[in-house]
Amino acid sequence: MGTSVHFKVIKQLLNQVNHIVFRSHIQTMSSASPPSSVRWSDLTHPVVAGLISVIVNYGGTFILVFQAAKVAGLSTELTASWVWSISIGVGVTGLILSWITREPIITAWSTPAAAFLVTALATTSYAEAVGAYLISAAAFVALGLSGYFEKAIRLIPPGVAAGLLAGILLQFGVKAFGGMSIDPLLAGLLIVTYVVLKRFTARYAVVGILVLGLAFLLLQNRVDLSGLELKLAAPVFTMPVFSLNALLSLALPLFLITLTGQYMPGMLVLRNDGFKTNANPIVTVAGLGSLLMAPFGSHAFNIAAITAAICTGREAHEDPSKRWIAGIAAGVFYILVGVFGVTLAAVFMAFPATFITTLAGLALLGTIGGSLAGAMADARAREASLITFLAAAANITMFGIGGAFWGLLIGLLAYAVLNGHLPQRTWAPQPSVQPATEPVAGKGVTD
């Protein structure tokens, strides 16, 4: 009974989205001209970029989901259902959005929300948590349909946006080299290989370190897959319970954390690389996906930020009009993980932490460099952009809200004080940041 009512509500919302979102925004969702034909030779780099983004997501942050499930006392079946729902959800939404827009729209679960749940689920029943997931997802659907998200993001100065992105990504670049202290042989091999490949064949640098790193780990027997058993995941429906306590202590923080920690930096990643897809349909579709999957355990998913940068930059493909393939590839890999549930998630998590952090940091070097160049390009906004960069890199955490929000708030306040106002204009990349529609051959580091 509960399942049928849930799907009836979703069906009604989907009909509304079809009329309100897709028909009214379809022109603004696609910023590029009709895509050029795709050849087999165009697949390698975006598919590898999609694979790396998935590996980094599962190997880097998915442990938080298992920690939260343990705190909540979930059974193996409910935990597998959580893995199934969130993997299938982000895979399908990312695949659909990338196909429609012909841009690399990467969706992912909300990492800061998962971290929040590690403590929140200790005092909230699982059924109440599912109810809170539904309320938060419905709020994102309403936000997307209202159109206010796109209006808000257009108020952010380009230099401040670039500084925010650079600050968020800085820790990943630092960790790439910090691995030298923990595992000098593995980290050193990846770094040296990356630099050499960048010198002689920049296009294959990221592909090369992925292949070489995996071969090195297998030769050293450092990836233990002996205990794995291939099993299909089965979704388990949980009847939601709604309470004022869960609304205030879980749904509201979940909405704010996901909005400020994922959606805003995620859209800035796309804007920084020149993609101009309207944010409102993305927020709406991701919110609908979250609404559909919440009763099966999915806490929230959204547009990705860190892992999206792996797929939106030049390393994914020299031609920006081909980078949407990375979004399709990532979606397929997520769906495969979802089908086999905990099994394939465990495969990704079996990789050493140094391999994950070094791979992610090196894959993001181009984006970090392009963001820093964009942050410093406008002399009038340079100091505010620098303040944003440092504040975001400091990863301030107050009142349960993460560093992306505080970095953006501090940067906007600095810009307003230093310039007397916030710009009333449409967001666009700085001239020094390579636009996605005009690739320059031979430039390997600017996105």
Image: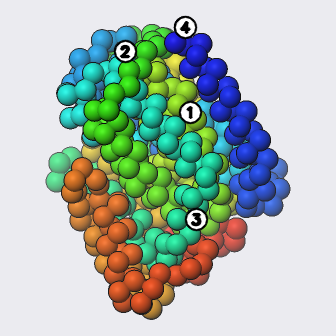
Mark linked to residue 386 = none
Badges 1 and 3: C-beta atoms under 8 Å apart?
A: no
* Structural distance between the alpha carbons of marks 3 and 4: 40 Å
Which residue lies under the disc numbered 1? 289
Q: Secondary structure at mark 4?
A: loop
Q: Pointer 1: residues within 10 angstroms few (<14), some, or many (20+)?
A: many
| Mark pair 4, 2: CA separation | 20 Å
Where is residue 232 drawn, in percent x and y? Answer: 49, 11
Query: What amino acid is at disc 1?
Result: Gly
Q: Amino acid at mark 3?
A: Lys
Residue 7 in sight here: yes
Looking at the image, is mark 1 or mark 2 earlier in the sequence?
2
Disc 3, SS: helix
The numbered mark at residue 1 is 4
Secondary-structure class at tag 1: helix
Residue bearing the label numbered 3: 151
Mark in front: 1 vs 3: 3
Q: Marks 4 and 2: CB-CB under 8 Å?
A: no
Location of residue 67 (image quadrant): top left
Q: Earlier in the sequence, mark 3 or mark 2?
A: 2
